[in-house]
Image (cartoon, helix red, strand yellow):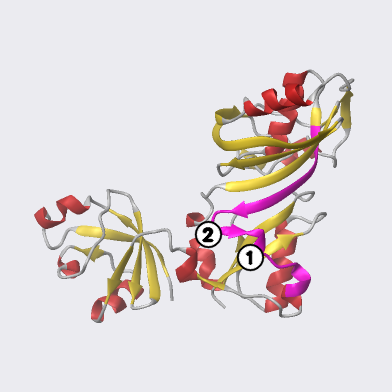
Amino acid sequence: MDGVVVLDKPRGCTSAQIVNRMKKALGAKKAGHTGTLDPFATGVLPVCLNQATKAIPYLGDHIKEYEAEMILGVSTDTMDDTGTVTGRADAEHIGRKDLEEVIEGFEGEIMQVPPMYSAAKVSGTKLYALARAGKEVQRKSKRVTIEEIKLLDFSCPKATFYVRCSRGTYVRVIASDIGGKLGCGAHLCGLRRLRSGQFTLSDARRIEDVESGNFSIVPLERVLSGYPRVYLEGRICESVRNGIPLSRGSLLGVELPEFKNRDIITIFCRKTILSICETKTDSDEFEYMEDKDIVFRHLRVFN
């Protein structure tokens, strides 16, 4: 049971709670998700099991897609409908064209300040813990990429929009900032993740389906298919299992892909994944290296 199960997370629970529930149902030794969904959010939540948990740091940088619903004219301290109302303003004068123009202005690279009610950390403490204690601290803004954002439906004060964005983007902040630019404030009342990297809602199963055995596990080999692969045979495979770095000498005669220094690649023995590696040189330099020089350094080794 080493692979990924894609859940359709329900509203009202944390990502950690739903992962623990699945771990218990399957009797897995280890389980972890690849990217948090807020308790009020639903949708695609990939959960790695057992050996696959080692790959989590290499699975979360992918593009995410969401469908979001927001209410104009009402602001909350959490920027969603679970928080306390902090402001109200008239939004009846806002037309569809006004809203579309503001929304389209968020496309591209933008700067975001993490909300106080979030899992981001300041000096090792999660922001939501500080917020619940009544404290507000300075947060550094970060750059995120909005590949596409568009209005899907609008019937004032409710608007539905689609967004395709980079990892770490807070859709709540987008909604709040849209309300700020319109001068009326806004908050999210619904958020559904449609895609996380290679996984979509068509892959997802409810937690009840998993508990009843109606699910499938995506093997680790498929999950990591986006990375270049190197195939080994013979005794060198055992060296990899023991965590010994791969030198030029050990790779003579092996077919290698093109790579740059610090690229991520995967090492296989036939169809079985052995490790995730970081390259220590460029492929163009391979023929000029000494046999003892390290080419691939293991980041994660799989049993």
- The residue at the point 17 percent across, 58 percent down is 293
Q: Nearer the viewer, residue 180 or 164?
A: 164
Q: Residues within 10 Å of mark 2 (few under 14, many from 20)?
A: some
Give the residue type that dot 2 points to.
Answer: Ile
The alpha-carbon separation of the residues under discs 2 and 1 comes to 18 Å
Residue identifier under label 1: 203
- The residue at the point 19 percent across, 69 percent down is 250
Picture coordinates of residue 141, whole percent (x, y): 59, 28
Q: Nearer the viewer, residue 246 or 37?
A: 37
Q: Quadrant of the C terminus?
A: bottom left
Q: Is residue 196 magenta?
A: yes
Q: Give the left or right position of residue 284, taking residue 262 as reference.
A: left
The residue segment tinted magenta is: 187-209
How many numbered tags mark residues here?
A: 2
- The residue at the point 85 percent across, 38 percent down is 83
Picture coordinates of residue 126, whole percent (x, y): 67, 42
Give the residue type that dot 1 points to.
Answer: Asp
Q: Give the left or right position of residue 110, taking residue 286 as reference.
A: right
- The residue at the point 64 percent across, 30 percent down is 113
Q: Is residue 230 visible?
A: yes
> Judging from the image, what secondary structure is the residue with disc 1 in?
helix
Please report whichever mark, 2 or 1, sits nearer to the chain's N-terminal start.
2
